[in-house]
Image: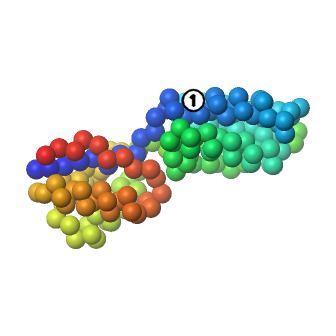
Amino acid sequence: MPSFDIVSKVDMQEIDNAVNQALKEILQRYDFKGTHNEIKLENEAIVLLGADDYKLDAVIDVLKGKLAKRNVSPKCLDFGKKEPASGTAVRQRVAIVQGISKEKGKEICKLIKNSKLKVQAQIMDDQVRVSGKKIDDLQSVIQLLKGQDVGIELQFINMRS
């Protein structure tokens, strides 16, 4: 029985490269001269530090631009609250979302079931497996999910026939 898996994974090496490029740009830009702005990659999160709110927003824009150039979707970033750091500095923690949560998995399964295609979707840990009798139905599911916005970046892997 043909099947494929729906996952949400992020290439951490690409994120590391984007963070390094953004940091390099921040160090060279004229509007950041004389202020303390940082981007640090810590495990599954990015810590942003800006001299003030406006500088932090500019740091976020630089980071998003570098991620986009490296084909990393901004949907994989979960921005936390801005919190004060020393003086007027502002810190923000950005979590990197990996995997499909149970809620998102249920939402994806519901979308697939509402499509009336003859396929079965089941949640397996942090991925969703879709199986059916015809490969055409599976390809229709892929097109359906690419057209929908589920809030996370989806990849389709392990297509087996």
Residue 78 lies, in percent from the top left, at: 57, 48
> Mark 1: few, some, or many residues within 10 Å (few <14, many ≥20)?
some
Would you name the residue on which mark 1 appears?
17
Residue 4 lies, in percent from the top left, at: 23, 48
**What residue is shown at x 75% (from left), y 37% (from top)?**
49
12 left or right of 101? right
**What residue is shown at x 75% (from left), y 45% (from top)?**
58
149 left or right of 118? right
Foreground residue, 66 or 48?
66
| Residue 89 shows up from this direction | no
For numbered disc 1, what is the local secondary structure? Answer: helix
135 in relation to 98, above or below? below
| Residue 78 shows up from this direction | yes
Residue 102 lies, in percent from the top left, at: 38, 53
**What residue is shown at x 64% (from left), y 31% (from top)?**
21
**What residue is shown at x 52% (from left), y 50% (from top)?**
75
Residue 3 lies, in percent from the top left, at: 19, 49
